[in-house]
Image (cartoon, coloured by chain):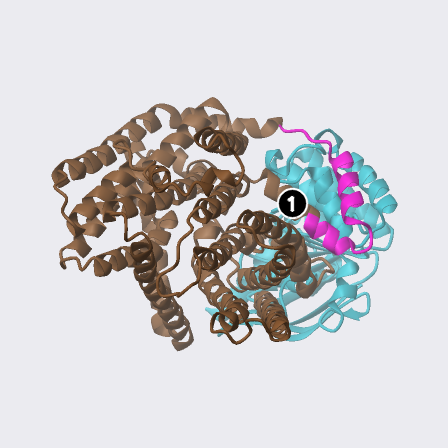
Chain colours: A brown, B cyan
Amino acid sequence: MSLLPLQRPAIFALKNVLRADRASSTLLFRDCVIGTLILAVMVGVYLGSIWTLGVISSTFGFVYLPPSSLISSFMLIVFFFLLISNLVEGLGAFFSSRSLDLIVATPISSAKLFLGKSIEVAVSSSWMVVIFVVPAMLGFGSFYSAPWSFFPLALLIILPLLVIAVQTAIFLILLFSMIVPANRTREVFVLVGLAVAAGTLLFVGLLFPEGGQSWFSAANVADIFWLISIPNTIWSPPYWVGVSLGELLQSSGKPLGLYLLLLGSFAVAIMCLTYFFFSLTFFNSFSRAQSQRQGVRLNSRQAHQRWQLLLGDRNRGLRAIAAKEYRVFFRDISQASQSLMLLGICSFYVFGIRIMYAFDVTVPGWEGKSWGQFLVLVSAATEAFIVSAVCTRFVYPSVSLEGESFWILQTSPLSMRELLRAKFLAWLIPVSLLCVTVFSVGAAGIGLSWDSLLLKAGSTFFVCYGMVGLAIGLGAVFANFNWEHSAQLAAGFGNLVFMLAGVVLVSISLLLLWVPFYLSFIGLSQHKPLVWLVSVLASHFLLAALNFTTAHCAMRFGERALLRRGE
Amino acid sequence: MIKIEKLKKSYGDFVAVDTISFSVKDGEVCSFLGVNGAGKTTTLKILAGVLKPTAGTVEICGIDISVDPRAAKRAIGYIPDRPHLHAKLTGREFLYFVSDLYDLSNEIAENRIDALLTEYRLRAWEDKLIESYSHGMKQRLATCAALLHEPRVLIVDEPMVGLDPHGAKLMKQLFRSYAKRGMSILVSTHSLNIAEEISDHIVIINRGQIIADGTLPEIKEREAAQDSNLEEIFLQLTLESDSQYS
């Protein structure tokens, strides 16, 4: 226990939660319901991955696609998300955590501090792996009829990838904070993000000099597979994982032991290197981050006048909350650096959709139906993921971000209902604007007509309405005002509940949107414009009703929960 | 005016505030004294509208806070013991935020913010982020925020914690000058010499119950301790009260 002193409070807290569960049947019931939901999502991911593998394998049956290629590509995406998530968490844990002053003042060894903080970062940012990657790997195993030994070995092989993601993120944070103070790191992240986006555009432009839609119109399978094989470079840890797992599934004679050795030794090496770098630079960077706080001077009066112009003078309560939310968003390092993740997700979506649009094949089992229709479903699912990610990272923590300053709102004449409504509106506008814009770009990229684009914009707004309301409501129900650093909020238990509830809401919304397409699919509304129109209007009406009701119910629950805090 | 009637606050089996009644008149500074855990902060939080009482009523300028919390809160200024403010806002931005919460017009807000920042010696820091402020500066900024909407009742929890001698003097002057203008001020403090210096009225609470209520001469007379100072009386009263429980 004394090896990891920083983990003791978390262990005690977990014990207390379990004790409280044993003492209260309501809490136990609540946790059982949430556990069941988690299990349901994992089963959904498992079945979804088997279905996707089936579609891919039948669609590209004419080209041999080894499992290692698919796993490498999948692992590259996972690694990207893990890296960004760890960057955000790491920045908070190493430089913004409230207890750091106390910890740094104790005679704790740098090894214990480093290990403790690394574990904190890994645990809070890696639950995504457990919920999404583990069932996906089980799906791979089942699809390729893997021997039972694949499953425990897969877990063991993924573990070093987690270590690499955590340590790379910490190394980058330490490196950045050495160059600029940690409290200014967000600017570096945003610059790096923009540079990466510009670099990707340039890279794709060089690859396909014809530009525009003709990038992919050649439908040249070799070109496309070359594109897919970009991550499969020898120096990439996701590739090592992909090859190792691929070899376990279907042996192709590649040296499994060598890749495992590469993976393990790289994990150990990056950990040692990061620790060495930490012991050399951390105290200086930490101290510099504290002293740099003195330097920031802003023109508050002028900035306020701009907010007054933008937000008007009719509802000052809303203006107070909205202006504060936006200011804090742009100044909080965790919040701002998470926009990098958002940028990545949006680029991934737009480019992913365009790349997939290049394929012009018939989807097996969908007689006569083109890949384009399958693509509509895939893009809708990806969009759902983006809305969830935005709400999870930015909207859900909004109530908790009030932190110990919540007393200001409690003692003000603003009621809890008004507070939640103000937060809801403050977030609904940017989230729906962002999503409608990005999704419309994506939809235009796959050649949707103007009327379809309009419908898409409408349905996107409804889903954003529901998700933002749900995020604000559940954010209030599970509000945590005593956080160590703000990045923790997006990795908390309440956020997991929000994600699961969000998955349910989005799934039902997608189902409703799918109804008119299904009717056309089975021939009910084909060549019957009136039936098509009625089905589209009815599905959108139901979609709006579902999302409005969800948002308002969630906020009502949230309001009650906040009021109960004063009882 | 603050009027508290049979106020009670329980957390499960634990009674933090046990059926207390007292009032603070207009233009009066009332010191609310007690040992740690006596129920002072709980009472103040109920008065400020942060906590809901289990039983009893609180009236602020004749408005029952449970019936019309919005109107009651407009009449209250609250300064907590630990001034947790939004660290990512500047001092001036924070005051703009508070002025919008209290629905002050832009012009009034601008004038009052300028005046308060000058009075509390924060003009040089108004454009810096609150995270760079010292504890005393945060306390002064919280005081500015509490006074921004010109409340008729001021509730202050431990006002002198973290203040330098200049800040402490400023705070004492503030209490007296605002009381002269008719404001009711309820101050919870452990600094008995300051309580003795500024108070018109003293209330002592122990284990959730009021053990003394009146002016200092009245309490001295009741306890037959004319030659004692407030500290001696306080220690004697709280020890007596504790011995009844042990």
Tell whether B64 sits left or right of B239: right
Quadrant where the C terminus of chain A sits is bottom right
Image height check: is A388 above or below B124? below
Q: Is residue A429 within the magenta segment?
A: no
Tell whether A49 sits left or right of A243: right
Instruction: Identify the residue at horizontal 64%, vertical 49% (top origin).
Output: B192
Chain identifier of the residue bearing label 1 in the image: A
Number of numbered labels in the structure image: 1
- Nearer-the-camera pick, A537 or B71: A537
- Nearer-the-camera pick, B156 or A329: A329
| Residue linked to disc 1 | A326
Residue A252 position in % (x across, y down): 14, 44
Q: Main secondary structure of the magenta part?
A: helix
Q: Which residues are magenta?
A: A296-322
- Nearer-the-camera pick, B79 or B181: B79
Q: Type of residue at label 1?
A: Tyr
